[in-house]
Image (cartoon, rainbow, N blue to C red):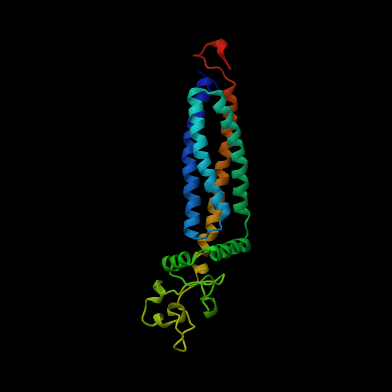
Amino acid sequence: MVCGGFTCSKNALAALNVLYILISFILIGVAAYGRVVAIVTSLTLVGSLITCGVVLFFISLIGLIGAVKHHQVMLFFYMIILFVLFLIQFALACACLAVNTEQKENIAKQGWMMASASTREDVQRNFNCCGYKSPPEKDLNVSDPLGFPFCKTSACCSGPEQSDAFCCTGKSSNSSSHDCPCDSCFVKLQNEIYSAFTMTGGVGLFFSFTEILGVWITVRYRNQKDPRANPSAFL
């Protein structure tokens, strides 16, 4: 059987959908990593790519079953949804890559403002930092948009000299109380936040073009007759 025939198209489409399943896990993993390392709840572009990965996983299962059974209806809906998913994923990936430095900083700021006090405390402890951009006394009110809890759980406040700093204890009992020994969390997370967009956008853009290949193979496969079936029973 020459390549391009029924068997070749069937095997190619089945193999491509197995690849899509792997790609969906890669998209979910990479985008989820971007959310975790950034600890920013407003990374909606990254979160949208996670959704695309989940949808791609289920669509791949439909495409795999449709390819094995040569099911016309399943292949039709698979082809339409896959094309729509390509458009969405391509747009989101381009958006992630097009975000400039100022926009990334604004998104990170919005994420910190939306985070709960417990989330901010977890960030400070896990990344050994204190506050969003700087830990002055006026920002230590957690109810403030850019406020944060005291950084006593951060490693930078664990030393005997550092433990008296105001950002660590909240007590302004000495002259050096306003000198915080901790770096700001923005400084600690800046590279992770920037790389989250670049990595997620690059992976999403690269794999989105494989979906066009899937649409083309599906259109070709649907219009071919199964040589093992009744020649007069083609739908």
Question: Most extreme residue toward the bottom, as rendered?
Answer: 175
Q: Specify the quadrant that holds the C terminus.
A: top right
**Above/below status of 47 relative to 218:** below
Q: How many marks?
A: 0
Query: Would you say 26 lies left or right of 225 here?
Result: left
Q: Residue at x 63, y 46 (%)?
A: 91
Pick out the residue farthest to the front: 143
Q: Nearer the viewer, residue 146 or 132?
A: 146
Q: Image height check: is 127 above or below 57?
A: below
Residue 134, percent across and down?
Answer: 53, 75
Relative to residue 104, is residue 48 depicted above or below?
A: above
Percent position of residue 148, x then y: 50, 72
Q: Position of residue 92 (x, y in %)?
A: 60, 48
Task: Out of 188 and 39, give the one closest to the viewer.
Answer: 39
Q: Position of residue 58 (x, y in %)?
A: 50, 37
Quadrant of residue 43 within the rendered picture: bottom right
Q: In the displayed structure, would residue 58 be above or below residue 232?
A: below
Compared across the picture, whether 213 is left or right of 172 comes to: right
